[in-house]
Amino acid sequence: MYDLVLKGGRVIDPSQELDTTADVAFSKGKVAAVGKDLKASAKGETRDVSGKIVVPGILDLHTHIYHLGTSLGVDPVQTAKDGGSTTLIDAGSAGPGNYPGFLKHVIEPCPVRILAYLNISFAGIPYFSKTTMVGECQDIRLLDVNECRRVAAENRDTIVGIKVRVGRGAGGTSGHMPLDMAVEVADDLGLPVMCHLDHPPPSRREVLDRMRPGDVLTHCFRPFPNAPIDGAGRVRSEINEARARGIFFDVGHGAGSFGFKTGREMIDNGFYPDCISSDIHCLSIEHTMLDNMITLSKFLCLGMPLNEVIRAATVNPAKAIRRADLGTLKVGAAGDAVVLDHRKGKFEYADVLGETLVGKHRLVNAGMVVGGKWWFDGIAKPGRTR
């Protein structure tokens, strides 16, 4: 007998190569069983999810949710509900100077799990809005490897890696130096790096050559420049070489980092992103990204198979942050799951360049299990799809 049973859904769990109709049961905050005819205890709860898809708890690998503590941060609870994400990974909103505030005021009180990449910059990402935009890595004086190392070491239960943003926008003329500093900290602590790359300099190759197996390149399906596709529509050699070395490629849609042309050509080449994430922040939430459910739906409409979309939202990001207990419905794993409604019809989407796509698919969050308990009833009528 179990505390909660989800009955009769299509269970897709790429961590176990599972795609079948089954029940999913939870006890004591953990996944307890996946099988037929599972029953809740007398005091337990049963939810009929027939006609829906049940997947492991979704991890959004790239969010900015230091809400009210940074200008770019958005509400994590609403982000979780809209995006169907049971784990939110903040991608460097906070640095060594303000991580304690992020931990106390956002991470600890939040009803869903929040983990974080610590920014190599002392202040995280402090100047990010419609009116003020200054890259935190433009001034090397703000990058203190000793402080970054200290704070990351003291918070290993919530910090999963080091974040660095390079490129003309985030780093000005600092080139690859911030990445070198982030790698030095990460090497010392045995952590992965997540690297943002915008406009050159540095180049894709300069960045990828410095990254190590297990590191994450986010914004990996950027439009030109620093796109992963060449003018002939082929995947660039340095991209294939990096994947072969074990680099994770993460979408990080955001307000400027995902184009349909790039996505279509990468998928046509058989190069699926390892992780699909939203890069939700104060600007992207009002742009064409909106939430992670929409981001996942875009990839489904571009021709990425459903099971691979789910893989890129569950077990793969869990691997990227080295958390084997997440993104899976294996017995004993964290008791998180998401119930999806896969709707068919005509849905209009847009990329960061304004190109529109009319797709046949829309994934909607129909309910969430967090810590073995039913947490959210889902979204009956999804909003905009652009």
Image (cartoon, rainbow, N blue to C red):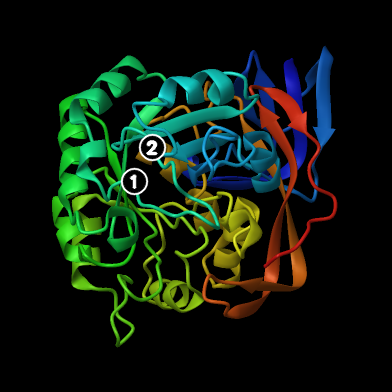
Q: Residue furthest bottom?
A: 232
Name the secondary structure under disc 2.
loop
Residue 321, x across and y down, in percent: 38, 35
Which residue is label 2 attached to?
A: 124
User: Quick check: 242 left or right of 74?
Assistant: left
Which residue is label 1 attached to?
A: 136
Query: Disc 2 marks which amino acid?
Result: Gly
Pick the quarter of the image with the N terminus. Answer: top right
Residue 210, x across and y down, in percent: 15, 51
Q: Residues within 10 Å of mark 1 (few under 14, many from 20)?
A: many
Residue 251 location, quadrant: bottom left
Of 331 and 322, nearer the camera is: 322
Cα separation, mark 1 vs mark 2, equals 7 Å
Residue 111, x across and y down, in percent: 65, 24
Q: Are marks 1 and 2 in contact (CB under 8 Å)?
A: yes
The numbered mark at residue 179 is none
User: Quick check: 177 left or right of 52?
Assistant: left
Q: Is residue 227 visible?
A: yes
User: Quick check: 42 left or right of 113?
Assistant: right
Of 242 and 383, nearer the camera is: 383
